[in-house]
Image (spheres, rainbow, N blue to C red):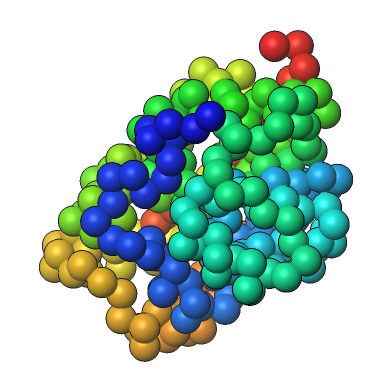
Amino acid sequence: MSSILDTPNCAAASADFEFAALDEAHFYPCAIVEEFAHYLQGQVIEVGAGIGQLTTLFAERIGKENLLGVEPDARFAAVFRERCPGIRLLEGTAADLPPGTACDAIVSVNVMEHIKDHVAEMARYHALLAPRKGYLCILTPARPEIYAPIDKDFGHFRRYTKASILEALTSAGFTPRKVFYFNFPGYFVWLLNFKLLKSRSFNPRMVRLYDRLIFRLSHAVERNLMRPPVGQSIIAIAQASNSQ
């Protein structure tokens, strides 16, 4: 069974993570799904599915029947069921999956930073993926120098660097395939608005403008021309081995 340290948001002062902001964005969630799309084959588990904001996009790619959401918060799970009819949901954590469960891919978006023992959590994912040599697809906040009061409000234990997420993945038994920073201009927005000005909330209008006028263009450059030297987030894709 899961423990409090396995449970996302156990240290948070905010009740809704970044859900309100994500609801204002269109291109940002689509970009996340696009980055992971190549690795979403077979049976996929979305850990920390929240209220299903990305789940519907994943389901469009792979089919509802191939997707399982995992969400420990009963409030979020209730909203998930309303938003994502026909998609299976486990109300719990990866530790609550039935013995012998295996899958081809696990998606973890803005989850690992909420879990204190992140290496143990990744090792749990490795056990689920190893029988099929599956892939773990992670997006998580990046760069500890921009850790801000709002990070603490959201229950973030850390922001990652390439080195720190590589170390965690390899310690958990994974072979990293891709690790890169994501959302270059978002790094500076977070630094100014949340680190320096210490804002504790998102402005919905500004989120919409950023998504449509800045992120849409910047991500096209990042994906097609050059990955940035820093970013608001980091993406890591790693493969499990059944030799562990």
Q: Quadrant of residue 209?
A: bottom left
Residue 234 percent coordinates (x, y): 48, 48
Q: Is residue 171 above or below residue 18?
A: above
Q: Is residue 164 left or right of residue 157?
A: right
Q: Is residue 25 left or right of residue 115?
A: right
Q: Quadrant of residue 49?
A: bottom right
Q: Is residue 211 above or below residue 36?
A: below
Q: Is residue 154 above or below residue 59?
A: above
Q: Furthest residue to the top?
A: 243
| Residue at point 38%, 35% (across, down) | 4
Q: Is residue 194 visible to the viewer in this orientation of the structure?
A: yes
Q: Quadrant of residue 77?
A: bottom right
Residue 190 percent coordinates (x, y): 29, 63
Q: Is residue 202 above or below residue 150?
A: below
Q: Quick one: 104 or 190, which is closer to the camera? A: 104
Residue 224 percent coordinates (x, y): 66, 61
| Residue at point 32%, 40% (across, down) | 158
| Residue at point 62%, 31% (across, down) | 125
Q: How many marks?
A: 0
Q: Quick one: 181 or 70, which is closer to the camera? A: 70
Q: Furthest residue to the left?
A: 197
Q: Quick one: 18 or 233, which is closer to the camera? A: 18
Q: Is residue 221 left or right of residue 155?
A: right
| Residue at point 46%, 62% (across, down) | 75
Q: Quick one: 81 or 28, which is closer to the camera? A: 81
Residue 174 percent coordinates (x, y): 63, 24
Q: Is residue 222 visible to the viewer in this orientation of the structure?
A: no
Q: Quadrant of the C terminus?
A: top right
